[in-house]
Image (spheres, rainbow, N blue to C red):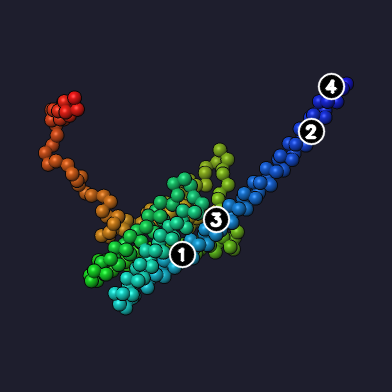
Amino acid sequence: MKNKNFWISALAVLLVFSLLWGFSENRRAADLKIATENQNQRAFNDFVSNLDELETNLAKSKVAGTPLQQVYYLSQTKLQSEITVKDLSLLPAKEFGLPYVDQFLNQIGEFSESLSQQIVKGNRPNQEQEETLSSIHDRLIEVNRKIQEIAVNLQASNIVWVDQPSPPWMPGKETATAAQAEEGEASKPASVRSSLEQLDASLQKLPPLTYSGQKDTHATPEPLGLPDFKVDEENARQAAQEFIKSIG
């Protein structure tokens, strides 16, 4: 009888501790969710504000009256693009991030820096560069417009930051979002992350930007530093033997 009472008491104590632990974990998870949402909100607000400022500086650089003014606004555009890229990295996204939005913002900064350095040296932008600047600005206006729409939806519709995971027997929302962007469907995403991913997918469909700048030097049409003659199997064997002899 004593053993029976002991086990009943032990089970009761374990049950109480389990309930307390469960309550504590739920409270901790709720606090973590609130903290994460607050962090996302701050990052997104900064991103929206800095992206709008980026578009403003780029627009002013197009209509600047003097080379000095144009250099100033292009320099501000470069600085603002770096800040905006940093804000973008803090937004909720999958493990690969938002590569096309990130690439576009970096290209704005690189082209602005290249153009400002050219103007400082006394060389005004040519017609092709002015057309590229206008093309970049037009594309940025569209990106800014979509980001402002997401901000309005976040305030008005109170959409969530991240989609809830789909059950195993249902297709994932991420797959549906990507497919909608590829087909050009004007669907309304259910979360901020899916909205950003849809924007990223829409940029992927646009023709790539071409300009003379830093990014163009990252790749070369032909390999550099290679000999003019072709290396066949016999030449490779002889070179390997000579190398082995040289190291003993």
On screen, residue 165 versus residue 83, left or right, reads: right
Q: CA distance from mark 3 to mark 2?
A: 40 Å
Q: CA distance from mark 1 to mark 4?
A: 69 Å
Q: Quadrant of the C terminus?
A: top left
Q: Amino acid at mark 4?
A: Asn
Closer to the observer: label 3 or label 2? 2
Q: Amino acid at mark 1?
A: Asn
Mark 3, residue position: 40
Residue 3 marker: 4
Residue at x 50%, y 62% (from the top left corner): 46
Q: Position of residue 22 (x, y in %)?
A: 71, 40
On screen, residue 168 versus residue 53, left or right, reads: right
Q: Position of residue 187 (x, y in %)?
A: 50, 56
Q: Amino acid at mark 2?
A: Val
Residue 113 marker: none
Mark 2 closeness class: few <14, some 14–19, many ≥20 residues within 10 Å: few
Question: Which of marks 2 and 4 precedes in the sequence?
Answer: 4
Whether residues under marks 3 and 2 lie with C-beta atoms below 8 angstroms apart, the answer is: no
